[in-house]
Image (cartoon, helix red, strand yellow):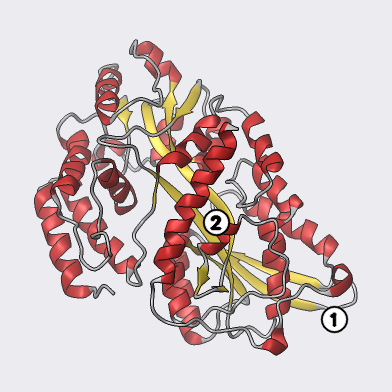
Amino acid sequence: MKKQKKLFALTAGLLTIALALSACGGTPASTPGSQSAAAPSGGGDTAEPVTITYCNFNASGGKEEVLQQMYEAFHEEYPNITVEIETIGFDDYFTQMQTRVAGGTAPDCYELNIENFSAYANKGVLAEITGVDLGRIDETALNAFNVGGKQYGLPGNFSNVVLIYNKDLFDQAQVDYPTADWTQEDVQAAAEAIRALGDDIFGYYQPVTYNEFYKVAAQYGGSLLNEDGTAFTINSEANVKAAQMMVDRVLESNVQPTEVQMGGMGDWDLFMSGRLGMIPTGIWAFSSFAEGCDFAWDIAVEPGADQKATAFFSNACVINADSPNKEAAATWITWLCSSDAAAQLRIDSGWDLPAINDEAALATYLDQTPPDNRQAVFDSLDYLVLPPTIEDYALMSDIIGQKLAAAAAGSMTAQQALDEAQAECEAQITLG
């Protein structure tokens, strides 16, 4: 079954992360045996009432109500557990969480993205999750948040990136719609044809940022670290070629708008305004585009260069090692990550996909439109590329992102940007 093969591709990608995390040093905190993470007996009816705190970022920007609906369904099943939910925007989330963890005021449980998980796990601030039924969660997805044979996080979701395109602009430009065979050259040709439709119409938008760069670098055969993760390769020939292509679309062909041309508008807003032909972005955009676009649009597997590569994201629910309510916290996050009710609410709302092993539940995702070609979401799992997993991930991404921004603004060349990023990362970050 084709879809099943794509799910196997997902687990293979997650295994790569798991191996990287297992190689990291440090020992997370273990949950004391007296504080087992077993769910309360009898559906939670006989346990004493308890209130726990849960902090997250993934619901920000429009999914707060969905998360509240999940909690309400949980509370019906476990009326003794009250969950106080705090949702913080992604831009502020990790700064706040670092401060809270360091100050001993972290919530009972909280969300971490896959890029930051290893840093928290290796600092010993996460409790081991034991005594709960994890049978509905994809086993290899679980391994992505397993360190030294102990489970320190539960995968609550997964999402990836596809190419979303405006069919009306393609029709006006008399360009064939993107297919799974497209390359970056095809993207450029179509983007130029769409750009020619008007001064305020653009063909393509891909932010010249770290998160986009590591993926495009992989499309050109590059990477940020060498194979064994002991040295930076940021300014490799392949990486420079990738960065130059991204910058040229802004400064040379101008199929992608400059910051001035954007006029303060966001990339999703530009697409929904009908003035952007293509945007590679996450599947979490589907619900916003379905509501906000008054034109026909669809998706395709993201085009590559020497090879295809597309980003994959997963967030983990973790428990504070110092929480006095580990048992209740484990009950809540296990339900959130694996229950039928939470999975269906996630799928029905067009959020992202639950990391569960129930193919029948995931199949309902394909029936939703738009986009018509939702199969591309699963086809894209054949081409996952994962960000490098290092403890100083935030510092590395900040350094590279700042240099890329300078290149996109024209204040330095792509080569200069990556040369400086290479030098600064080598000077400030020690690789294991």
Q: Tell me which corner region of the image, top left, top right, bottom left or bottom right, holds residue 175.
A: top left
- Which picture quadrant has residue 403? bottom left
Left or right for 408, reference 204? left
Residue 139, percent from left and from top: 60, 58
Quadrant holding the C terminus: bottom left
Does residue 324 sit above or below 234 in this rendering?
Answer: below
Disc marking residue 83: none
Residue drawn at x 65%, y 50% is 357
Camera-side residue of 280 and 14: 14
Label 1 neighbourhood size at 10 Å, few (<14), some (14-19), many (20+)? few
Q: Earlier in the sequence, mark 1 or mark 2?
A: 1
Q: Residue at x 47, y 72 (%)?
A: 96
96 w.r.t. 337: above or below: below
* 86 relative to 421 in the view: left or right: right
In percent of width and height, residue 187 lies at 29, 27
What residue type is disc 2 on? Answer: Asn
The residue that disc 1 covers is 48
Residue occupying image coordinates x 65% and y 41%? 362
Q: Quadrant of residue 382?
A: top left
Q: Nearer the viewer, residue 333 or 97?
A: 333
Report the front residue among 273 and 75.
Answer: 75
What mark, if any, has residue 58 been given in the picture? 2
Quadrant of the image containing the N terminus: top right
Find the distance from the CA under tag 1 to the CA under tag 2.
Answer: 30 Å
Q: Position of residue 9 (x, y in %)?
A: 49, 44
Query: SS for tag 2?
Result: loop
Number of numbered discs visible in the structure rendering: 2
> Where residue 225 appears, x then y in whole percent?
25, 60
Element marked by disc 1: loop
The amino acid type found where label 1 is placed reads Glu
Please indicate, yes or no, whether residue 409 appears anywhere in the rendered image. no
